Image (tube, helix red, strand yellow):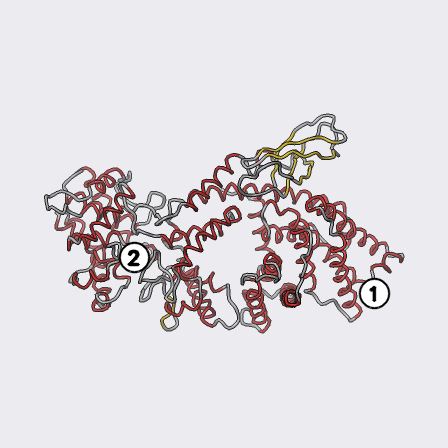
Amino acid sequence: MVVEKCRKFHHLSGHFSVKFKFPYFAAERRCKSWLSKDIDFFICVMNFPCGRSASGPVQVRYQVIPVNKEAVDYDYVLTLFNDETGKQIELVRQLLSSMEDGEISVSAYDTAWVALVEDVKKSGVPQFPTALEWIANNQLLDGSWGDRSVFLTHDRILNTLACLVALKTWNIHPEMIERGLKFVLENMGKLEGEDAQHMAAGFEIIIPTLLDMARALGMSEVSDMPCTQHIYAKRDLKLARIPKEVMHNMPTTLLFSLEGLDGLDWKKLLKLQYEDGSFISSVASTAFAAMQTKDEKCLNYLQNVVQKFQLGVPPFYPLSIYERLWAVNKVERLGISRHFRSEIVDCLSYVQRYWNDEGLSWTEPSPVKELDSTVIFHDVLRIFKNGGEFACFVGQMLEGPSMMFNLYRTSQVQFPGEAILEEAKRFSFEFLRSQQACDEILDKWMILKDLPANNKYLELAKMDYSNCQAIHCLEWEALQKWYAENKILRASGIRRRNLLVAYYLAAASIFEPERCMERVAWAKSSVLIESIICYFQSNKSSGDMCKIYSNQDDFGRELVYSLVRFLHELSVELQAAYGTGSLAQLGQAWGRWLLTVDNGTEAGGYMHGEEAALLVQTINICTRGTCGALSSISSRCLYAELSSIATKLCAQLRQCRNQQVRMCKDGESKVSKQIDSGMKLLVQLVLPNTPSGDVDAGVKQTFLTVAKSFYYAAYFDPITIDGHIAKILFEPVE
């Protein structure tokens, strides 16, 4: 949908022509005017192509919505595909399409280790002088080096010490050394008060090494500080637990921190090099190896990294798998993935090529696998399980919330019988709860922005969210008008909040601007369903709609009129969008549901849950203009099974909501276990790729979408839901 502001159109009568310009296409249509003279209004164009350039004229469906100037801020309503948004989409598309070996933000720490490498000719100059140039150009105003966007003491001390050692080694920029030393002396004591989750990997091992190097270079005032004693004690404790005989014979995460270890057998360690000359793609470890061994492969690797990144270097390279998975995760969670379907498929196809029975790493091929990249196929999770615990890397001693959160997200996509995912769910849930209770839920991976493209993704997401939100606000204005016109809704107990919650559930589930018809139909259907159920339950009589229409039941007759008007108006919209009104299919779907209400009334009470199947059918008709033909017996059986599971699930969830039994408080009850089992069955039927002749994947997804909305309503209390509504629908994104 595109929203364009138009003001004071004069003498509108009969038909008028409107023309819209987009980055990808222009379209012109004629529409019948129903606006009076001198009125401000918005022209809303719906169901236009969202993608690459289209050739020739494009047919665009639209609505003209008059608005109250006081109710809607003109400056707040934006055009979805204006030039700025269109350019941002193309920029992100180029980023996703141009990934090669992967990139991550420059690290002052790793750049400093590269700067320490001496010329191979041992002429007393640095092998990579550009690294020193980067250090000289990137000291922060407080004298430190590190992440500019957020202050973490561990990060700043680690980076600053490394840069000080590099500058002092080559005896340059004394004024920078002085300012850096001042920063370290003033902030070293803060390490004890900062959360351990904010530490870089191997911090306890690396910092003592840097302190010893600083002392050897004449900066003993740093290493002699009283607060450093506990750092050395932690180093000694951790080194005592490191099985060096293991690290010399097989790849482990200790290869990340070679610069912090002593007594290394380089003859054995060089056998663990990657083919590109690095040690598990770690720039600092490889630089340290080059300093100790002058190994040609190490130096070639460092030369390649420096050439690619010009001045400063990243902590890891290459990161081809990591960057693709991170990018896909970002665009999916930011809600902008619909613009990049083909690019996402390309990224995941690349990753799949390197999948094996031992999992994934951050690049290919890597003998050291990590949980954060591997949480795609559940069987491999056993490799990362030790006793009752899971770790990001095999043998890792300290875990962070972000890795556990990814594990928890993975455990949500569970099929029946997947015990390992159930274990992962319990462990990650308990871990995150304990971290939350201690106010330690944030770690460095959640705070720091590691990929250079992150800001580009975020900029587009903010634009897109604001556009979606503006359109949702317009739809909510129109729904309130519809509610005011249908007095029968208020008479049957439907309040404005009921309509708002119904629309919110629809908009949160189907948020894309071009899917206006599905959203609005979902919201209207929900409140009409509630009205009809309320009517039948209060009358305790036969539900034959023809009898209601012919009898002297004004309330029932008005309810029928409201339903018929809704179905007729929806059919007109479908006719404009798809060339078919689908009134017969809509009537059949609602007719079948009304019979279930009628039968339930006669049997002593309507069994909730059937409305879920009706919502699915209504939404799918709006999506495609038809329910879709189920040509084979197998497809009809699958659809019936989906409908049966969704109906039972939604009945159970509605019962929990009506009885005010919250899922989060009742996780071990019999009902909760039944719901959990039903969700697993539904996920198992919905997620696998659709074979030829089977139920359409979009139709299956709608069953899961509707079930999740029922789950949400049962999980959260009304006050929490109201808070979500206020934030998501009405608060502008910063």
Q: Are marks 2 and 1 in contact (CB under 8 Å)?
A: no
Residue type, label 2: Ala
Rendered location of residue 439, percent (x, y)? 41, 57
> Can residue 214 be seen?
yes
Q: Quadrant of residue 106?
A: top left
Circle 2 sits in a helix, a strand or a loop, which is it? loop
- Lateral position of residue 76 relative to residue 458, left or right: right
Find the distance from the CA under tag 2 to the CA under tag 1: 70 Å
What residue lies at 18% left-to-right and 47% top-to-bottom?
A: 116
What residue lies at 64% left-to-right and 50% top-to-bottom?
A: 519
Q: Quadrant of the N terminus?
A: top right
- Lateral position of residue 343 relative to residue 514, left or right: left
- Lateral position of residue 549 relative to residue 472, left or right: right
Circle 1 sits in a helix, a strand or a loop, which is it? loop
62, above or below 727, in the image: above
Is 547 in front, or is 13? 13
Residue type, label 1: Ser
Q: Crowdedness of circle 2 by 10 Å Cα count: few (<14), some, many (20+)?
A: some
207, above or below 17, in the image: below
Mark 2, residue position: 201
Rendered location of residue 271, percent (x, y)? 21, 62
Q: Crowdedness of circle 1 by 10 Å Cα count: few (<14), some, many (20+)?
A: some
Rendered location of residue 59, percent (x, y)? 65, 39
Q: Quadrant of residue 373?
A: bottom left
Is 590 in front, or is 675? 590
User: From this viewpoint, which residue is outermost toward the top?
Assistant: 10
Task: Give the number of callouts.
Answer: 2
> Can residue 224 be seen?
no
Mark 1, residue position: 542
Which mark is on residue 3? none
Rendered location of residue 517, percent (x, y)? 66, 48
N-terminal of the pair, mark 2 or mark 1, is 2
